[in-house]
């Protein structure tokens, strides 16, 4: 019933508007088209200047309302992001000045030079000096912005420092898989045809005659987690990004960076977190705050839920966390408890290597 | 001075002659026209223009309605619109909520339809067809038959695109850019099945339509100008439409080649774009795929090699028409005609050299990226020239606010607002932060979507009397303008702030995100405004169709006291446009306010006492 009522009201409003429009046309004909056109002209000229004034107030008001909800309301969470923020501010100032000047000129001219009885429009087909000025000034301003932009661009895309934590990030519909190199600090090789229920990344855990691939020992101690990754405050973090199925994008809004995850073509991105997650909860005043990884490239119907989390912690906390993890291989093929106690697997490098060898041997026998 | 008087009389005489013979004209015409040959398979460029326009308007309504539907989801994620379920069915709406798949299908179809079917076919298809022969002084296009084919290929593309909405697995839902592997893998998304097959066929046909049209426009402009109409005397509309056609002819084939490779990957087992893929799930097209060695980014290069010129294909006709309308209604020549042509040329060239700025975050070589930053920001220079020249055209004019003029002024305002944010996004170091957020949505909707739409409205209001011999209702026109103008800013301006919060585009629901869920109220506001603005467009549609039959009649041949040639034709020109000889051109199109005369049409010969002429 209410739907019907709403439709009826809308139709009625349309009819009224139409009748007014029709009536005003008849009035115009009666009054003389020239005269009513000139009246319309005055009204619209007035609206033009009103729109400008209210519009500029609206721009200010909008900023008051929403600035606090943007990332600019507080510090960038990464060292790289500081550069982005300062560049943003500079660009806002430059484009903002141009915006105000040109919009004011546009609507002011429209208002000021609206049709008047005895006004003679000015025959002014061109003026080289003016045109040169407004070619050169934007060119200089843009050169300035390009130079600053490219300096930052080359610094963002440069090689990560050697002390960086390396994490491999793999997107899939619709979640994230993270891999750490494990104790040997080397990522083992992987091949997508090895992917199965227990081997989500396709690590080379065994020989394959049909694929002509050898088992890679470096892959055996790699640690694989999902949805949450860890990074260390103040220490560069390098992401090696890939995808299992379609193109995803590692969107790190708090760090002001992002990079596509492309199947078959690895990409990289590095950043240096400035605050731990805990500190960030205080800075934002939000006790539930998390550094979120948002998928920023349309990847299918679950795109909007492809959320990952980065926990930024201190180095000691990171070390404790890392030492509590089991390699994906040993998680997939737990060694018999009688020969190797589970606690020993985590404790020493030697033990882990031995375990993996034992399991590999067992696999080879099969 | 007596000379002048004689010339004036001659012009008047010719006018009277034309009007007088208008009725007889049809009888003189050698072939008689049936309903089919006049309204359906017409070869008259004016009728084809109207066909493009009305088909474009149908698509605009559908595309706009789609945006209203997905804005309902974004604005009211918790509401249940049960009545929608009755109208649209279970596939689209379940439990009163638009399903994620329907949401992505709507977003994708909205983008495709608005970019290609409305703002390419509907805008440049309409006005290139309508204005080129009339303004260069030709009886029709170089090849009327090809022109007709161009429309019917577009029609066919429309039918196929429309049919994709009704297939069982839904229309394509991977975004209008159709990036593989998502668009290539049937197992990755239901929309990538039959829906994508139909999408790609429709798009291929659309490319054919676009090429047939474009070649015709170029040939007509280069070869069929009337006597005296040198290239530098062409109205700026024609220059803009010329560059538009050149851009289309050079870039659409690249898109087609990209699509053909995609068809091969989808259907014939090739691996142009595919490598190392494991699709989760069960059913056909999932699991480990055999494809190796392809590169998904290759498609993006091919796509954006069209995709970027495409935004200028959309924008340039609007720029051209706005230049013309601003000049006519300021009663003043366009400022810096040659600079305007030069900047159109510069934009057309640069349009081909900036495509990779859509790909700064695909992992492309940083050095390559830096070149594209430089070239992208270079486009701001010709754009700035255009803006300043438009402003100077208004300066010291005697401005008549016709609805067309209002939309033209609105275009300039939107072009400034949206163009300036292009300077942010073109700078790769900022793009790496803002890419694929609502900032991008705000940017391109303002500068390309709404601004071009405004150009299109300006064109429709301005040339409607020439199209139908009647006026649109002005009061409705003014209401249409102000609501749309205010609404456009209310919708898209706050989106910049969402973008600055990093809020990603193409999300069905933001409620699980700590970083983005603070904009619920704003999203609701935007959706409400979008609904109102959409309703206002219906008002315009009504005005359009009502006025075809019931509008106030045009009583003079040149209602705006305009200089261009289309206003020398009879009020309702027949096929062939002019009765008798095509007028000869003696001057450029912008002799307004010159030597104390309000306007001097292009076909008026040069008076020896004139101060200077172009």
Image (tube, rainbow, N blue to C red):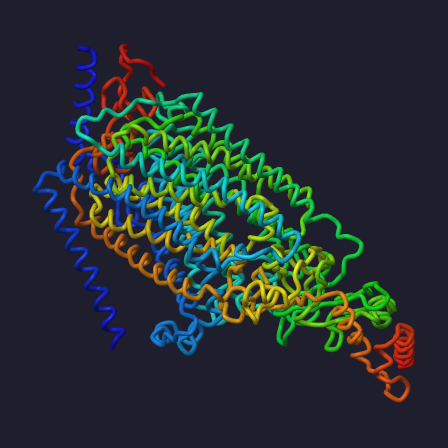
* Total numbered labels: 0
Question: Residue A212's quadrant in the figure?
Answer: bottom right
The percent coordinates of residue A241 (x first, y second) are 70, 60
| Residue B270 as seen in the image, left or right of residue B333 | right
The percent coordinates of residue B557 (x first, y second) are 20, 33
Residue sitting nearer the eye, A241 or B355? A241
Instruction: Find the residue positioned furthest to the bottom.
Output: A338
Q: Judge whether A125 appears above or below B162 on screen.
A: above
Residue sitting nearer the eye, A241 or B130? A241
Residue sitting nearer the eye, B148 or B97? B97
Question: Residue B237's quadrant in the figure?
Answer: top left
The percent coordinates of residue A165 (x first, y second) are 76, 61
Quadrant position of the N terminus of chain B in the picture: top left
The percent coordinates of residue A6 (x first, y second) are 25, 70
- Residue at 16 percent of width and 40 percent of height: A39
- Residue at 50 percent of width and 42 percent of height: A93
Q: Judge whether B606 appears above or below B467 on screen.
A: above
Can residue A126 be seen here? The reply is yes
Instruction: Find the residue positioned furthest to the left.
Output: A30
Can residue B200 be seen here? The reply is no
Residue sitting nearer the eye, B192 or A285? A285
- Residue at 35 percent of width and 62 percent of height: B528
Q: Judge whether A254 appears above or below B471 on screen.
A: below
Q: Judge whether A125 appears above or below A169 on screen.
A: above
| Residue A177 as seen in the image, left or right of residue A112 | right
| Residue A267 as seen in the image, left or right of residue A348 | left
| Residue A178 as seen in the image, left or right of residue A122 | right
Quadrant position of the C terminus of chain B in the picture: top left
């Amino acid at each position: 019933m209410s739907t019907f009522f709403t439709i009826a009201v809308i139709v009625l409003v349309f009819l009224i508007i139409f009748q007014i429009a029709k009536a005003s046309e008849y009035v115009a004909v009666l009054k003389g088209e020239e005269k009513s056109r000139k009246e319309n002209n005055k009204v619209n000229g007035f609206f033009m200047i009103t729109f400008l004034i209210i519009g500029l107030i609206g721009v200010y008001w909008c900023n008051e309302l929403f600035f606090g909800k943007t990332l600019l309301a507080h510090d960038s969470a990464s060292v790289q992001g500081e550069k982005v923020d300062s560049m943003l501010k500079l660009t806002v100032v430059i484009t903002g000045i141009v915006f105000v000047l040109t919009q004011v000129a546009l609507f002011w001219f429209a208002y000021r030079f609206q049709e008047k009885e005895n006004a003679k429009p000015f025959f002014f087909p061109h003026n080289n000096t003016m045109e040169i000025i407004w070619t050169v000034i934007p060119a200089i301003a843009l050169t300035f912005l390009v130079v600053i932009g490219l300096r930052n661009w080359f610094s963002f895309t440069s090689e990560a420092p050697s002390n960086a934590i390396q994490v491999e990030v793999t997107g899939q519909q619709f979640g994230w898989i993270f891999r750490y190199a494990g104790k040997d600090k080397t990522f083992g090789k992987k091949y997508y045809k090895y992917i199965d229920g227990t081997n989500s990344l396709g690590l080379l855990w065994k020989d394959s005659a049909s694929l002509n691939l050898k088992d890679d020992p470096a892959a055996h101690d790699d640690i694989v987690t999902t949805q949450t990754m860890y990074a260390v405050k103040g220490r560069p973090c390098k992401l090696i990004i890939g995808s299992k199925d379609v193109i995803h994008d590692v969107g790190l809004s708090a760090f002001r960076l992002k990079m596509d995850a492309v199947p078959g073509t690895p990409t990289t991105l590095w950043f240096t977190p400035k605050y731990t997650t805990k500190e960030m909860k205080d800075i934002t005043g939000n006790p539930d705050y998390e550094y979120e990884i948002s998928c920023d490239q349309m990847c299918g119907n679950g795109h909007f839920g492809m959320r990952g989390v980065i926990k930024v912690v201190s180095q000691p906390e990171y070390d404790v966390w890392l030492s509590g993890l089991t390699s994906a291989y040993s998680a997939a093929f737990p060694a018999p408890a009688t020969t190797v106690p589970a606690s020993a697997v985590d404790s020493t490098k030697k033990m882990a290597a031995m375990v993996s060898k034992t399991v590999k041997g067992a696999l080879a026998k099969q | 001075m007596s000379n002048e008087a004689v010339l004036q009389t001659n012009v008047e005489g010719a006018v009277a002659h034309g009007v007088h013979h208008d009725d007889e004209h049809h009888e003189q015409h050698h072939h008689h026209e049936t309903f089919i040959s006049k309204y359906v398979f017409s070869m008259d460029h004016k009728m084809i223009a109207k066909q493009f326009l009305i088909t474009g308007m149908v698509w605009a309504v559908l595309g706009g309605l789609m945006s209203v539907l997905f804005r309902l989801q974004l604005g009211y994620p918790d509401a249940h619109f049960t009545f929608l379920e009755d109208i649209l069915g279970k596939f689209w709406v379940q439990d009163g909520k638009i399903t994620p798949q329907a949401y992505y299908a709507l977003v994708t179809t909205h983008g495709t339809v608005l970019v290609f079917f409305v703002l390419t076919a509907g805008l440049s298809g309409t006005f290139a067809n309508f204005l080129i022969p009339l303004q260069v002084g030709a009886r029709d296009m170089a090849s009327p038959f090809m022109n007709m084919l161009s429309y019917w290929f577009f029609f066919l593309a429309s039918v196929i695109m429309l049919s994709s909405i009704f297939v069982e697995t839904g229309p394509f839902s991977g975004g209008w850019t159709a990036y593989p592997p998502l668009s290539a893998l049937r197992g990755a998304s239901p929309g990538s099945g039959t829906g994508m097959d139909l999408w790609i066929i429709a798009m291929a046909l659309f490319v054919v339509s676009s090429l047939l049209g474009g070649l015709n426009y170029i040939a007509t402009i280069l070869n069929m100008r009337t006597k005296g109409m040198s290239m530098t005397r062409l109205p700026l509309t024609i220059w803009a439409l010329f560059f538009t056609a050149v851009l289309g002819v050079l870039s659409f084939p690249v898109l087609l080649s990209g699509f053909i490779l995609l068809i091969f990957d989808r259907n014939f087992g090739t691996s142009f774009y595919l490598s190392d893929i494991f699709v989760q799930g069960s059913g056909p097209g999932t699991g480990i795929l055999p494809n190796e060695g392809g590169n998904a980014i290759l498609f993006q290069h091919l796509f954006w090699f069209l995709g970027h010129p495409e935004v200028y294909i959309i924008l340039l006709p609007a720029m051209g028409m706005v230049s013309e309308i601003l000049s006519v209604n300021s009663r003043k020549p366009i400022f810096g005609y040659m600079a305007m042509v030069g900047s159109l040329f510069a934009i057309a060239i640069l349009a081909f050299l900036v495509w990779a700025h859509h790909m700064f975050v695909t992992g492309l070589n940083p050095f390559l990226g830096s070149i594209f930053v430089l070239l992208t920001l270079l486009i701001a220079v010709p754009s700035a020239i255009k803006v300043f020249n438009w402003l100077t055209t208004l300066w010291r004019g005697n401005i008549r606010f016709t609805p067309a003029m209002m939309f033209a002024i609105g275009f300039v305002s939107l072009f400034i607002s949206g163009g300036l944010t292009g300077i942010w996004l073109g700078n790769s170091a900022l793009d790496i932060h803002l890419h694929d957020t609502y900032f991008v949505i705000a940017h391109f909707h303002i500068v390309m979507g709404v601004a071009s739409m405004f150009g299109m409205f300006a064109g429709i209001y301005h040339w409607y009397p020439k199209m139908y011999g009647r006026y649109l209702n002005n009061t409705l026109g003014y209401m249409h303008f102000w609501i749309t103008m205010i609404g456009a800013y209310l919708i898209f301006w706050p989106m910049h702030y969402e973008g600055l919060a990093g809020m990603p585009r193409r999300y069905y629901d933001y409620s699980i995100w700590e970083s983005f869920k603070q904009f619920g109220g704003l999203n609701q506001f935007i959706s409400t405004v979008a609904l109102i603005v959409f309703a206002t467009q219906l008002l315009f549609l009504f005005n359009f169709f009502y006025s075809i039959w019931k509008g106030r009649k045009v009583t003079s041949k040149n209602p705006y006291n305009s200089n261009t040639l289309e206003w020398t034709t009879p009020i309702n020109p027949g096929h062939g446009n002019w009765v008798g000889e095509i007028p000869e051109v003696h001057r450029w199109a912008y002799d307004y306010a010159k030597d104390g005369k309000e306007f001097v049409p292009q076909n008026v010969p040069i008076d020896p006492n004139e101060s200077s002429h172009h």
